[in-house]
Image: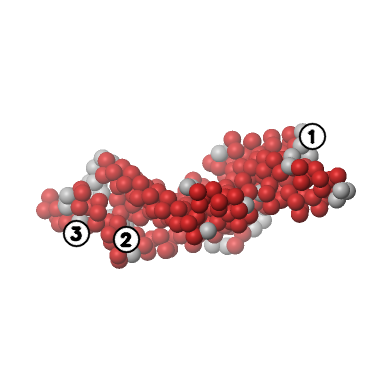
Amino acid sequence: MIRFLLNRLLQGILVLFALYTITFLLAKAMPGEPFTSEKNVSAETKANIRKLYGLDRPILEQYFIYPKNVLLEGSFGVSTSKGRPVADIIAQSFPNSLLLGLCALGFAIGIGVPIGILSAVRRNSWLDWLCMAIAMIGICVPSFTIGPLLQIHVAAHVPGLKVAGWGNPQDVLLPAFTLGLVSAAYLARLTRGGILEVLSQDFVRTAHAKGIAPITVILKHTLRGGLLPAVAYLGPAFAALISGSFIVETIFQVPGMGQHFVNAATTRDEFLLLGLSLFFGFLIVVMNLLADLLTGLLDPRVRLEGNKD
């Protein structure tokens, strides 16, 4: 188990290193610089600002200084567009994105897993076709279409719900539902495939032959193995719900991290862009690690395969 964990941690570190390198190079390749929009700024003043942020140093030196500050000082730098530490911006906006992501994941599990189980149990029936058709629609229809439809046809007619805004507990419902629909569709298909694979095993047929009630076979003999694909998907799905929610956050005016990511790209704010990218990458690595651990607990073969690598 320890070797399994070490392998996953090493892979995560390599992923973060590659993510930092790519983001750093892309940030440097963007046209202009963070201070090109400033008006009536002399060349001397602009040079002093660049020196203050360390942008006057050689590219290679900047490349190594930033991760050094992150690891040794826990500093993600100062945002050139907002004049605030990037860590403070993340600390202020992350709780909103986290709450939205958790609620979206709850909707995804509550909708996708039962649909997948029901579809697998009623394989090739009209119910199976209906469930999978709904799942396919959920995958194909983007959130920037679902969100406005919910605003027009639900929020505008249901008391207590707002078209946009953040502050009341019920304000999370529509954006979380919008964000979680795609993950629910994927979970439904993954759950169906996993359950069908387990239902074809000999021990399940033996349980049916012994006269065990179908509901008992599903709950005690099928779910643990059948949910493995869905469990493996939950880790990256949760990280993606948090990091990929900027469209939904924009539609419903949620003060989360997505707005800062967009602003960082449009204002060429290198430190904010690097900080958010590394933070999102760290979330994805951690959630993948937790998903691997949970998968390994449910299926010991995963741990054995990891130890052989």
Identify the mark nearer the N-term, 2 or 1. 2
Identify the mark nearer the N-term, 1 or 3. 3
Expressed as whole percent of the image width and height from the top left, the position of residue 129 reads 74, 34
Tell me: 57 left or right of 230: left
Which residue is identified by label 1? Answer: 125
Q: CA distance from mark 2 to mark 3?
A: 18 Å
Residue 70 numbered mark, or none: 2
Identify the mark nearer the N-term, 2 or 3. 3
Q: Is residue 30 above or below residue 252?
A: above
Which residue is identified by label 3? Answer: 52
Q: Is residue 140 above or below residue 91?
A: above
Expressed as whole percent of the image width and height from the top left, the position of residue 266 reads 34, 45
| Discs 1/3, front | 1
Tell me: 44 left or right of 227: left
Task: Give SS at disc 1.
Answer: loop
Amino acid type, residue under disc 2 in the picture = Val
